[in-house]
């Protein structure tokens, strides 16, 4: 019987258990996007997970959407990530880099020079982002030309190569949460009339080209993709969710894994799962009121054979030893949401591990 503690494999990545630390922005890199020694400590503390997926990493300068988010497009960034991956591996863990281009929800104030944000169409997202000047509206983006699209793909490929050089076990492409690839896939953000817009096949073209480029550069067994069907985050609307994701997975090559951020649409998850030839990692959210993923929820989706791995988010922030806590049915630390984004070690590397006296009888 498969349990949370059963080993598994995601392509070439052999995981010691089914726990996956979900990607979560923590904004502790330098202003130049260089990972810090504190980040190495943070990830190494959580190396008991079968697999760690990093916070979103910008593949190029125009991909940045948050202050103090890390990149993988400079020598200094690669060297900084090498310190992180070395620390995780020394602690017995496996770690993949999530590459995330923010597209229209980025902001020129975050770029080294005053470039305009890019997107499939010149359509401004509703919402705000945090910049050095404080909270501001999302900007009006530039509609990408074919040359811009080719340049973005090249940036992704270089970053994937940099990730392997930095010691990552694989790379996850972020195609969800309203970021650039999701923008191309969504009819409300993509109103192009060329081969990258219009029908479902055209709206999927950019995502497919990015995936194919990764496979050519680092291999399918080290390439993964994350999707978030029906998730309206960052002003995304999908009028054709089932059709869109069915078309995506129908001709998707076998990858290291596919990662689904569920948005209270289990029927969509089940449809995708039946068609996949890749292992599925699920961040399960069947009901909005369920809150953070628990051991009980994780065990339930594994027992249903819905997925191979279960992604835990906030619980891994507050509990670096979450695997052990769930194994012994121990209590969980209280989460301090005020320290999620930015700052120092507080709420980042100072959460306590389980005191043996706290273990339930």
Image (tube, helix red, strand yellow):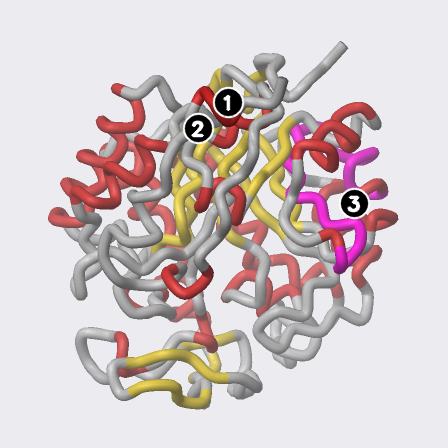
Q: Are marks 3 and 1 in contact (CB under 8 Å)?
A: no
Q: How many marks?
A: 3
Judge whether 12 appears above or below 107 on screen: above
Write down the quadrant of residue 336 in the picture.
bottom left
Q: Secondary structure at mark 2?
A: loop
**Which mark, residue 269?**
3
- Tell me the mark number nearer the camera, choosing from 2 and 3: 2
Q: Which residues are magenta?
A: 271-289
Quadrant for the N terminus, please.
top right
Of labels 3 and 1, earlier in sequence is 3
Q: Are marks 2 and 1 in contact (CB under 8 Å)?
A: yes
Q: Residues within 10 Å of mark 3 (few under 14, many from 20)?
A: many
Q: Position of residue 17 (x, y in %)?
A: 55, 19
Q: Residues within 10 Å of mark 2 (few under 14, many from 20)?
A: some
Q: CA distance from mark 2 to mark 3?
A: 34 Å
**Extreme right residue here?**
267
Name the residue tied to disc 1. 324
**Which mark, residue 140?**
none
Q: Inspect the magenta stretch and tell me whether residue 287 lies in it.
A: yes
The residue located at (85%, 43%) in the rendering is: 271
Q: Position of residue 125 (x, y in %)?
A: 55, 83
Judge whether 158 appears above or below 241 on screen: above
Name the residue tied to disc 2. 354
Q: Secondary structure at mark 1?
A: helix
- Tell me the mark number nearer the camera, choosing from 2 and 1: 2
Q: Position of residue 316 (x, y in %)?
A: 48, 40
Residue 65 at least partly seen:
yes
Quadrant for the C terminus, please.
top right
């Amino acid at each position: 019987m498969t349990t949370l503690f059963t080993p598994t494999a995601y392509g070439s990545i052999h995981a010691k258990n089914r726990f996956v630390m979900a990607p979560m922005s923590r904004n502790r890199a330098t202003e130049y996007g260089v990972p810090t020694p504190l980040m190495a400590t943070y990830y190494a503390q959580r190396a008991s997970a079968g697999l760690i997926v990093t916070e979103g990493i910008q593949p190029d300068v125009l991909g940045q959407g948050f202050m103090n988010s890390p990149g993988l497009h400079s020598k200094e960034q690669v060297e900084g990530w090498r310190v992180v991956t070395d620390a995780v591996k020394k602690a017995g863990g496996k770690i993949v880099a999530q590459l995330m281009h923010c597209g229209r929800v980025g902001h020129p104030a975050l770029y080294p020079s005053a470039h305009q944000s890019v997107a499939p169409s010149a359509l401004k997202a509703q919402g705000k982002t945090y910049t050095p000047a404080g909270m501001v509206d999302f900007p009006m983006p530039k509609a990408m030309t074919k040359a811009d699209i080719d340049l973005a793909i090249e940036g992704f490929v270089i970053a994937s190569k940099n990730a392997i050089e930095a010691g990552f076990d694989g790379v996850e492409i972020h195609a969800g949460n309203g970021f650039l690839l999701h923008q191309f896939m969504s009819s409300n953000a993509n109103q192009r009339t060329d081969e990258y817009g219009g029908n479902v096949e055209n709206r999927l073209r950019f995502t497919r080209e990015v995936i194919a480029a990764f496979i050519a550069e680092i291999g399918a067994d080290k390439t993964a993709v994350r999707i978030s069907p029906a998730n309206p985050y960052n002003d995304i609307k999908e009028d054709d969710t089932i059709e869109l994701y069915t078309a995506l997975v129908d001709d998707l090559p076998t990858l290291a894994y596919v990662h689904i951020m569920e948005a209270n649409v289990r029927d969509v998850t089940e449809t995708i799962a039946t068609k996949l030839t890749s292992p599925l990692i699920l961040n399960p959210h069947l009901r909005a009121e369920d809150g953070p993923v628990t051991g009980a929820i994780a065990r339930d989706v594994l027992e249903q054979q819905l997925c191979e791995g279960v992604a835990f988010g906030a619980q891994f922030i507050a509990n670096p030893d979450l695997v052990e806590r769930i194994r012994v049915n121990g209590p969980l630390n209280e989460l301090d949401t005020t320290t999620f984004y930015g700052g120092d070690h507080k709420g980042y590397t100072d959460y306590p591990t389980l005191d043996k006296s706290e273990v339930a009888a």
